Every structure is written in C-alpha cells, then in structure tokens.
C-alpha cells in the first residue's frame, strides 16, 4: 500500500501538499480545496469534504492507496477556464476560412484531406469527444466536420502518412497540395495551423477515440483511464510526466468510460 499524507503546505506555495511518507517527497500540490476533495472522493466516495475539513483543522491527514489504484492528480495549472481559452486562440474560425477560401480561389484546387482523416473526425464527433474540455467536462464544443478542424487533423498527420514529422505539411505537403502550397508561400499568414488550443484538442480528441475504439460500452474489468492512456503513449514512445497532452487525453478517456458505463479495475 502507498502511505500518503496530505498536509497544509508550508513550502510549495500551494495550499495542500500530497507527500509520500516513504521518502518525504511532495508528489503533488493543490491550490483549491475542491480539487483535493474530488481526488479523495475517487478513493473514498463521499468523504472528500470531511477529509479536507480534517486537514484544515489538524494540519494533515493520512490516506493509504493500493499501488494499482493510485493515480497522480492532474495539475490545476492545466485546467484552463473558458475565458482563458478564448484569449489563447491564435486564429479563429472566421480568419481561417478567409485564408482557406482565398487559397481555393487563387489555385482553383479542391481539398485534399484524406478520407481516413475525415472518418476519424466524424468518429470523434459521434463519440462526443469534441465536447469535452481540459477538465473532462462538457465545454466549448469543437467542430470535427468543419474545414478548420479537419485541416488541423490533416496537417498533423491524422489518418495518413503523407507528411514526415510536425513540419511535414509545409515540407512535403506543398509538393502535392496546391492549397497548402499557396497558404505557405502566398498567404499573409504562412502557418494558420499553429493555434495551440485547437492543436491540443484535435490531437487528444483523436487519441481518446483510438484508446477507446476497441472497448465496448458496459465492459467490465477494464484498466482505468490513466493506465489506458499511459499504455497508448508508451506504445508511441511519448512521454507521460508533465505532459499536458497526456493529461487532456486521459480525462477525455475517463469521461468516455463513465458515459458508457464501463467498469474499471
């Protein structure tokens, strides 16, 4: 069993620290009591508030967690509010469509988005991942069937292997796609595919769909979302620790498992 202590912080700058009793190291810290309550509720349902009150009164509280049940909490700094997301946007849909329409008018070309990329986008929408935000709850829905979302999926390589690496769309893509070529060389904005908000969501929407694609609704004895996502990331040699993409994909997988009444271990 993992023996852990949650105590009022005196050094991290946060309000509560999660400490490993074995070595005294701080594993995680919380700013808000509500986030700590939710984490405790995951192990002792309905006791989150009482536990936090105990910590507030006594300065600390102890909890034991089986190793196979332990999940490192998600960092609050990555739980971005809707108003902050709107401020983060590097390009909105209206601006993107102006660039795309100008490219089509100048080149006379049609979209070259692969059919498999479109299929993945449609699958994301069908399963509902496009509605889930950073915290794993319904938020500002994205539009997987619209050009901007599909072009982001296309330029990031989802559903095809035409591009070699993250910069592939403007290295390889310009050789066969007139629209991408015009955007890169002629547009006032040479990279309209660099909106960090949409890039993260498209990637993690796709990842969450692929992770859950072979799980049937109502299944039992399934690995928890954290470990399903971790196995997926490790299979592609992607790092897990301090990775906001991993955190986001994991909460989306957890949302899907709960929605489809999948029982986890």
Image (tube, rainbow, N blue to C red):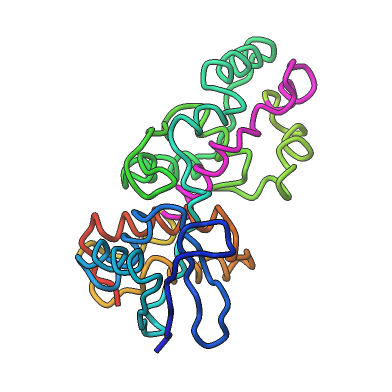
Specify the quadrant that holds the C terminus.
bottom left
Which residue is more in the foreground, 77 or 130? 77
Judged by its main secondary structure, the magenta piece is helix
| Residue 112 image-quadrant placement | top right
Which residue is more in the foreground, 111 or 38? 38
Residue 102, position as x, y percentages in the image: 64, 12
Task: Provide the residue span drawn in magenta.
Answer: 180-208
Residue 46, position as x, y percentages in the image: 19, 65
Name the residue at 25% across, 59% down.
258
Name the residue at 42% across, 85% down.
3
Picture mark count: 0
Image height of 10 relative to 155, above or below: below
Image height of 126 relative to 74, above or below: above
Q: Is residue 210 left or right of residue 107?
A: left
The furthest residue to the front:
57
Residue 187, position as x, y percentages in the image: 73, 17
Name the residue at 53% across, 49% down.
77
Name the residue at 54% across, 65% down.
10
Specify the quadrant that holds the N terminus.
bottom left
């Amino acid at each position: 069993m993992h023996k852990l202590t949650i105590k009022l912080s005196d050094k991290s700058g946060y309000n509560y620290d999660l400490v490993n009793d074995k070595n005294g190291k701080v594993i995680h810290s919380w700013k808000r009591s509500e986030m700590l309550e939710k984490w405790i509720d995951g192990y002792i349902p309905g006791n989150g508030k009482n536990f936090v009150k105990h910590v507030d009164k006594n300065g600390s509280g102890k909890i034991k967690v089986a190793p196979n049940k332990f999940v490192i909490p998600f960092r609050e700094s990555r739980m971005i509010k809707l108003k902050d997301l709107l401020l983060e946007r590097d390009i909105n849909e209206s601006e993107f469509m102006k660039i795309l329409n100008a490219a089509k008018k100048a080149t006379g070309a049609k979209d070259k988005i692969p059919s498999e990329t479109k299929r993945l986008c449609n699958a994301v929408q069908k399963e509902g991942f496009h509605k889930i935000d950073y915290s794993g709850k319904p938020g500002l829905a994205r539009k997987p069937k619209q050009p901007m979302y599909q072009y982001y999926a296309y330029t990031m390589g989802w559903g095809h292997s035409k591009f070699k690496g993250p910069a592939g769309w403007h290295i390889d893509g310009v050789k066969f796609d007139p629209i991408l070529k015009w955007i890169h060389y002629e547009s006032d904005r040479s990279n309209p595919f660099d909106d960090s908000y949409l890039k993260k969501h498209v990637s993690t929407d796709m990842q969450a769909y692929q992770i859950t694609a072979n799980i049937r609704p109502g299944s039992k004895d399934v690995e928890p979302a954290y470990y399903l996502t971790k196995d997926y990331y490790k299979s592609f040699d992607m790092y897990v620790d301090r990775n906001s993409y991993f955190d986001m994909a994991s909460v989306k997988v957890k949302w899907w498992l709960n929605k489809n009444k999948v029982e986890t271990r």
